[in-house]
Amino acid sequence: MKILISIVSYREKELLNTVKSFYEDASNKDNLLFSIVSQDDEHPDLSFIDPKCLNYHQIHWKDTFGVGWARHVAQKAFPEFDYYLQLDSHMFSEKNWDVKLIKTFNKAKLLCENPVLTCYPAMYRIEEDERIIGPVPTNGCSDVSHLNWSKSVWPVQRPMTSDVSISNYINAAVVFSTKSFVDAVPYDPDLTFFHEEVALTIRSEAAGFTAVCIVEPIFYHFYGPDRLKAGRQYNPVFGLEVVEHKNLGSIKNDVYSSQVLRGQTTGVYAISKDDIEAFCKKNDFTIKT
């Protein structure tokens, strides 16, 4: 059962540690396919992975087209796989994460026919180059109920108590499902950072998939405030006026993203107005674009 692991990074010092963790801590290394997109000045050595199981796309950070483009490239790396795992580039895993994740997915299938596992992962921080878990010990569920959403607002996070729980929002830091999910909801290469998750969530639900929150920690995430403390908070969306991105229009394409969320586009990545309205009505959710 092959798992395609999609990791895209932007000027990320944790990328090597992230890939090593998910490789070394897996129970079945032979079942892993790594698709890595590194957007940086220098790119870490990933030669410890069998070349047949690694697609490594390297690009200078000034040449990137943005997060949607990078995730799109990563998804297209391998034609055949069984499961798809999308991760942020600043994460690490528990031992036997692959067995635990598939076990959780099978539990989620008792709740719905086509689950997409997601969560706000438990946190880690870095002190003197050492990874320290906490203080948040459990995963959180994304919630957009009663939310007026704009590109500068993220869903609230709420704690969960059961093993798995139905959610109404997909956090792009953790996405796990079958290949059928990738086939039905391929990544839109033109979406901006701020519109990525809400569009993915609505498209997924329209395609018949249900977001399910992973409650028991399997992964840990290096969050913004701690990244700032460590001097590692880089994002191509912020401070674009003072950095030399060559494809600024693609990275900051708010016009296109707003059209997507108003149901004004066509093609494989489009969202119909009916699907947008249905999602908003179900969750008492208002999109401001």
Image: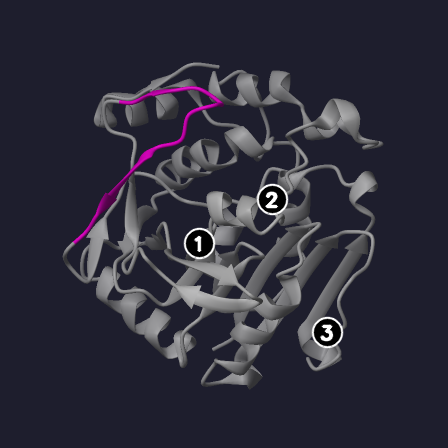
Q: Which residue is mark 1?
A: 175
- Mark 3 or 2, nearer chain start: 3
Q: Which residue is mark 3?
A: 46
Answer with left or right where residue 255 lies relative to residue 152: right
The amino acid at mark 3 is Leu
Comparing 49 with 123, the one in front is 123
Answer with left or right where residue 1 lies relative to residue 66: left
Identify which residue is drawn at 53% across, 80% down. 31
Magenta span contains residue 155:
yes
- Mark 2 or 1, nearer chain start: 1
Q: Which residue is mark 2?
A: 233
Region in magenta: 147-160
Contact check, label 3 and label 1, Cβ < 8 Å? no
- Helix, strand or loop for disc 2: loop
Answer with left or right where residue 217 lies relative to residue 76: left
- Circle nearer the viewer, 3 or 1: 3
How far apart, in angstroms, are the residues tagged by discs 3 and 2? 23 Å
Relative to residue 276, is residue 103 depicted above or below? below
The reply to whether residue 186 is visible in this rendering is no
Q: Position of residue 120 (x, y in %)?
A: 36, 50
- Helix, strand or loop for disc 3: loop
The tag on residue 261 is none
